[in-house]
Image: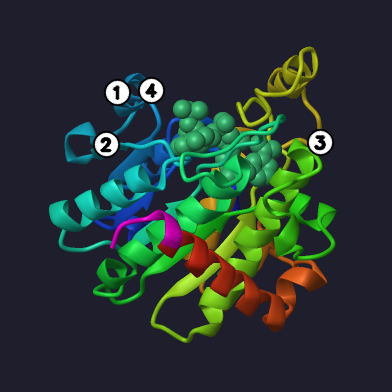
């Protein structure tokens, strides 16, 4: 049977050695697996989590804990997102990579600290702000790479519908829309022709993560079952982590590529439309400017 690391055998994993990578949502299923895998390849990690206890626990599982920087922030508070981004700029002279992995599925209606819709803020505005803040630092390195962890769930939203952001019909619509925006935004950034590579990746339908913790039981329990059972259509966390590392290292496919697990795939028409990309860009800038300090 294929092992998760077999998916990376076409890459020169030595390239990771000594790289400095900032990974968000490192205390969760896919994120912690990615952090642990990267630490085995001597990556200097800057890891984000929402809770200090979880970050401390994760640190114990890393290969080079002494080299790791841990940062805590709730992404529903953009001031806190800005604070950790600025901390990174103060603490480090270089950054090779950024992996925007943190994300949430939230079932009910909720407003973030900035007064905007919760899922939109955590899943789209926060990574957009981090990218904006850290771009100058990343661009000091030769081949900076930014990975946005998106989802095939983006196909559940047919139109960009920025006018619906504040009033999603339900949690699923809010989640699906935020993942559509992750890909649309990646495409827009890639069109800017900078010396930076932007990729988006769907890591699979992943078993045993806490993404759907907010679903009513027993659904939450059901999403945990495949961790223990062989199910061919379900991805396990080591393989999901490998999809992210594959996108990070892959040089065969250009900036702006969206991957369904390991393979490049056309995202939805809505995400590929340059007019939508521009509209989303302007909307995002407006919301960030309104809700953060310069
Ligand atoms: N699981 C899947 O099947 C699947 C499929 C496609 C795409 N994805 C994407 O993969 C990424 C990782 O998801 P996962 O399945 O590993 O979920 P997870 O186990 O719930 O991990 C999510 C990570 O994001 C953090 N996070 C959640 N809300 C946050 C907030 N408000 N502020 C800051 N950090 C927050 C979590 O922190 P805590 O540990 O404190 O909760 C955790 O570190 C997400 O972007 C998700 O959309 C997942």
Q: CA distance from mark 2 to mark 3?
A: 35 Å
Name the element at disc 1.
Answer: helix
Q: Which residue is mark 1?
A: 56
Residue 48 lies in the magenta-colored region: no
Residue extent of the magenta highlight: 290-294
Do the CB atoms of the residues marked 2 and 1 lie less than 8 Å apart? yes
Residue 101 left/right relative to 98: right
Mark yes or no: residue 33 visible. no
3 vs 1, front mark: 1
Picture coordinates of residue 135 (x, y %)? 34, 69
| Image point (81%, 29%), residue name | 231
Quadrant containing the C terminus is bottom left
N-term-proximal mark, 3 vs 1: 1
2 vs 3, front mark: 2
N-term-proximal mark, 2 vs 1: 1
Q: Which residue is mark 4?
A: 54
Q: CA distance from mark 3 to mark 4?
A: 30 Å
Q: Which residue is mark 3?
A: 232
Q: CA distance from mark 4 to mark 1?
A: 5 Å
Do the CB atoms of the residues marked 4 and 2 lie less than 8 Å apart? no
- Decide which of 36, 80 is in the foreground and name it: 80
Q: Give neighbour class at mark 3: few <14, some 14-19, many 20+ (Cα, 10 Å).
A: few
| Image point (42%, 44%), residue name | 24
Picture coordinates of residue 103 (x, y %)? 56, 41
Specify whether tag 4 is near ligand 1 (CB below 8 Å): yes
Q: CA distance from mark 4 to mark 2?
A: 10 Å
Picture coordinates of residue 124 (x, y %)? 56, 54
Residue 43 left/right relative to 155: left
Q: Which residue is mark 2?
A: 70
Quadrant containing the N terminus is top right
Q: Give neighbour class at mark 1: few <14, some 14-19, many 20+ (Cα, 10 Å).
A: some
| Image point (34%, 57%), residue name | 16
């Amino acid at each position: 049977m294929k092992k998760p690391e077999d998916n990376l055998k076409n890459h020169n994993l030595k390239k990771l050695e000594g790289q400095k990578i900032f990974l968000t949502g490192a205390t969760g299923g896919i994120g912690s697996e990615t952090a642990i895998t990267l630490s085995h390849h001597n990556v200097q990690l800057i890891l984000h989590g929402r809770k200090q206890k979880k970050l401390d626990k994760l640190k114990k599982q890393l290969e080079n804990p002494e080299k790791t920087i841990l940062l805590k922030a709730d992404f529903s508070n953009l001031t806190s997102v800005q604070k950790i981004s600025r901390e990174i700029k103060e603490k480090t002279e270089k950054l090779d990579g950024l992996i925007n992995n943190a994300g949430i599925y939230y079932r009910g209606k909720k407003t973030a600290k900035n007064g905007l819709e919760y899922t939109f803020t955590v899943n789209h505005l926060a990574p957009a702000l981090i990218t904006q803040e850290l771009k100058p630092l990343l661009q000091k390195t030769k081949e900076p790479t930014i990975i946005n962890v998106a989802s095939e769930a983006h196909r559940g939203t047919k139109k960009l519908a920025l006018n619906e952001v504040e009033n999603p019909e339900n949690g699923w619509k809010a989640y699906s829309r935020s993942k559509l925006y992750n890909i649309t935004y990646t495409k827009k950034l890639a069109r800017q022709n900078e010396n930076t590579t932007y990729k988006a990746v769907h890591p699979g339908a992943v078993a045993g993560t806490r993404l759907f913790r907010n679903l009513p039981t027993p659904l939450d329990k059901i999403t945990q079952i495949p961790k223990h059972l062989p199910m061919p259509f379900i991805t396990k966390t080591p393989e999901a982590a490998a999809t992210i590392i594959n996108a990070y290292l892959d040089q065969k496919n250009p900036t702006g590529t969206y991957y369904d697990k390991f393979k490049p795939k056309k995202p939805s028409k809505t995400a590929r439309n340059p007019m939508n990309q521009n509209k989303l860009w302007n909307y995002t800038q407006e919301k960030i400017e309104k809700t953060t300090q310069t």
